[in-house]
Image (spheres, helix red, strand yellow):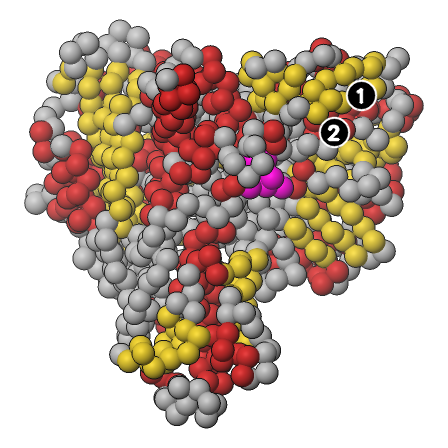
Amino acid sequence: MPDPIPMPTRFGSSGQPVTRRDGVAKVTGAATFAADNHPNGLLHAVYVPATIARGRVVSMDVAAARAHPGVVEVYTPDNSLKLAGDPDAKPFMFAFRMHVLQTDRIAYANQPIALVVAETIEAANEGARLLAPVYEAETPRVTLDDAEGYKPEAAGFGAAETVHGDVEAGHAAAAKSVDLTYETPSQYHNAMETHAVVAEWDGDRLTLDLPNQAIVMSKAAYGYYFGIPPQNVLIRSPYLGGGFGSKAMSHAPVMLAIAAARAIGRPVKLMLRRDQMFGPVGHRGATRQHIRIGIDGDARMTVLDHHSLSATSTFDDFIEPAANASQGLYDAGALRSSHTGVRLDVGTPGPMRAPGEASGSAVLECAMDEMAEAAGMDPLEFRLKNYAETEPGTGKPYSSKALRECYAQGAEHFGWAGRPLEAGTMRDEAGMLVGWGMGTALFHAPMFAAEARATLRPDGTGLVETGAADMGQGAWTALAQIAADALGLPLDKVEFRAGTSDLPDGGVAGGSGHTATAGGALHSAGMDAIARLAEIATADPASPLHGAGNATIVARDGRLVVEGDEERGEDFATIIARAGGEAVVGTGGASRPPEAGAAHAMYAHGAVFAEVKVDPELYQMRVTRLVGAFAAGRIINPKLAESQLYGGMIWGLSFALHEEARHDRRTGRIVNGDLAGYHVPVNADVTGFDVITVHEDDPYVNALGIKGVGEIGITGTVGAIANAIRHATGTRVRRFPIRIEDLLAGG
Amino acid sequence: MSHSISLTVNGARHDVTLEDARVTLLDLLRERLQMPGTKKGCDRGQCGACTVLVDGRRVNSCLTLAVTVDDSDIVTIEGLAEGDSLHPVQTAFIEHDGFQCGYCTPGQIMSAVGLIAEGHAGDDLERIREGMSGNICRCSAYKGIAEAVQDAARRMAADEERKSA
Ligand code: FES
Ligand code: FES
């Protein structure tokens, strides 16, 4: 087993609730998002979305569109923009098949069927309207029952099936069991910033202003599709207006705009309309989950058997890995997670904030409550009864697990102890039905790979660089805090450069692993720069550090000092000046060695407690209190981490009560594909939320002890709210979002 | 047919000739006057990202045709701070972490400034939440937003009192 990783001994700015370094830019309108760019000679592109989900385009009035004043060019499958790389190949990670006008077949509503480029947005929109496509429509398959299932090769980015122990024996051994089917709808990321690009070519060099969660990695993707070396691609993505998983990969409309810019020889801007966000840019696929839990006479779980029927497109695979959420949490004697795919006439799903974990946890946590109820037990007591001391199935020790403390602190703060077991017994003074529910939150703590550079400048200040992306998680701030500590400098003495693809690879902002990964790289680059500076100082007879062992030297407030004898030291600038005035450059990287992952199970945990009030006649539901207690390793910036956790919990609220894309069965189109019809919470929906961060030291997860907080807030929350509604009303609704009509119908 | 309009944006006068009557105030600001601080989230009046003040009232600039704001006085996010000194609402948004990605933020802030000026929410959190519910934040920074507006409303009221005392 790997030894514990020695933790940095002293933290300066890390752990402090520093306000966002990009705060002033964001409150003054100075923060530049992709579509805010306006190079000279800019053209505007609008893509034309298919208004049927299955069939083919018979004709379009290209002449009318071309004749509209201001329209520069119209592209259709008849004069399509050729890419150098194959849009139907999947040559690298995060590559999805794209419809870039290579066919007149339509595989989903909102698939691009043409691109109109014009001098103004207004002309482009009008040109697009004038195309008035004529279709040959076929019956679309848009519900989970519309097609046969198939056995997928993978679920999300993980296994399609995982089995631990003897599942059949587990079922047979059960004294009591539940056998339940739940449904979750398709959901759409809907970052407030729609997908957008400003593409500009200079010969075979391409500059993209593009919101992107994996800036450096994406260079290779665009290089492949456009037949140019990756180093010829410059991606600028200083700010993303939200990503939530949808902005790590290339999408068809963006590809078309880039290709048009090359063909026409002028820069092109394309910004998706809100309704166009429902189709070509990924979504969380719909699921029907079948979950079975068995317990013995002592209420210990003999089996947890979770299956998900997950929707994908007819032309590519992304199976919402919902059943995998049942791995890693409860100590069941046997454990199975399995998936079946079903191909529908929809855009290909993709990872959306907590892919699999969100939809799987929703169902798992409801099922746990149903099992607790069948056992006549308090839901928290039942979960504690089945608390896993080591990872279920694998037996691996957890790198750390402060879930008990999360349960205890969350329950205490919420006042869970007074909860009556029976449903439908609590009312408030206004006569509203009151219910309390809870759920466990779980999210794996991954690390990817990243690199960074740290420079100590002759004036003693620091410059740290990595091609990281900030989509709101606070990278500009939290990563700078980590770097400042590694360099032994106060935060305001460190300049941080990120957000462009010509920097060292900052990794992927996703999977809740970005702070750990990019932060780890910055930490190691900073330590490298300090080690190099220490080498210079200890070799210099004129330095007070001359002859001191490298290992005993540490950086503190812009000085190198001997550990334990801080009088003996010298400031960075003086050391550098005497050595000739050249900046000292350190480099570093971070990733998790496979043996570390093999030795420990690594997860962040949490417990969420919800109170709902339901009108006894109208069945209107309101979440009145939501308390989340989370243990996620070391928190670099509590202010930003809490914002992420609140955001995740509100996404959980949204999952439970708001979000759902509904298809018109005749055309296959989504009928509520805008922000009026696709409901997400607004300010008035959010009251009584509290976040508790539970202290957790983790000496194994990575050098900084970080687990990540971006996604865990959704997990646990959905189940907690659904369970509270059951507790308030006595009605169990087994499809999300929970609707008034379901309660009126009694489930 | 072209349309000539004249409007004031953040104190500066602009005489604009529009060749196209379909141009919205939002696209006029973003694409023609090159002031992209105001954001487009839906272009349909459903999200509030494009909120600006027109003659002191908060409006969705995506639903406002530019030709209808002839002679109007517009304030956008770029015109709120005075030099380096931020408007109290801007300061409060930073302090209360009233945003994450920052994309909805210009609209949230302009909406908050409008709401405070309307005077009917005061520093009541519940009313502030209601009054800010036309501005969607997908990052869901709602708690910080509501607290920032409350804090700014209080500070601005206290400033007013001091001034009038
Ligand atoms: S962009 Fe105007 S309300 Fe959404
Ligand atoms: S801060 Fe991202 S949408 Fe509000």
Label 1: element kind: strand
Label 1 marks a residue whose chain is B
Residue bearing the label numbered 1: B16
Residue A269 vertical placement versus B66 (above, below) = below
Judge from the rendering whether residue B50 lies leftward or rightward of residue A207; answer left or right: left
Q: Amino acid at mark 2?
A: Leu
Please state the total of marks drawn on the protein image.
Answer: 2
Asked if one can make out residue A558 in the rendered structure from this viewpoint, the answer is yes
Question: What residue sits 38% from the left and 33% below the top?
Answer: B144
Same chain shared by disc 1 and disc 2: yes
Q: Nearer the viewer, residue A388 or A240?
A: A240
Which of the labelled discs sits on residue B33, or is there none? 2
Question: What residue sits 78% from the left and 47% below the top?
Answer: A200
User: As drawn, which residue projects farthest toward the front?
Assistant: B165
Q: Which residues are magenta?
A: A25-32
- Disc 2 crowd rating (10 Å Cα; few below 14, some 14-19, many 20+) is few
Question: What residue sits 51% from the left and 66% below the top?
Answer: A461
Q: Amino acid at mark 1?
A: Val
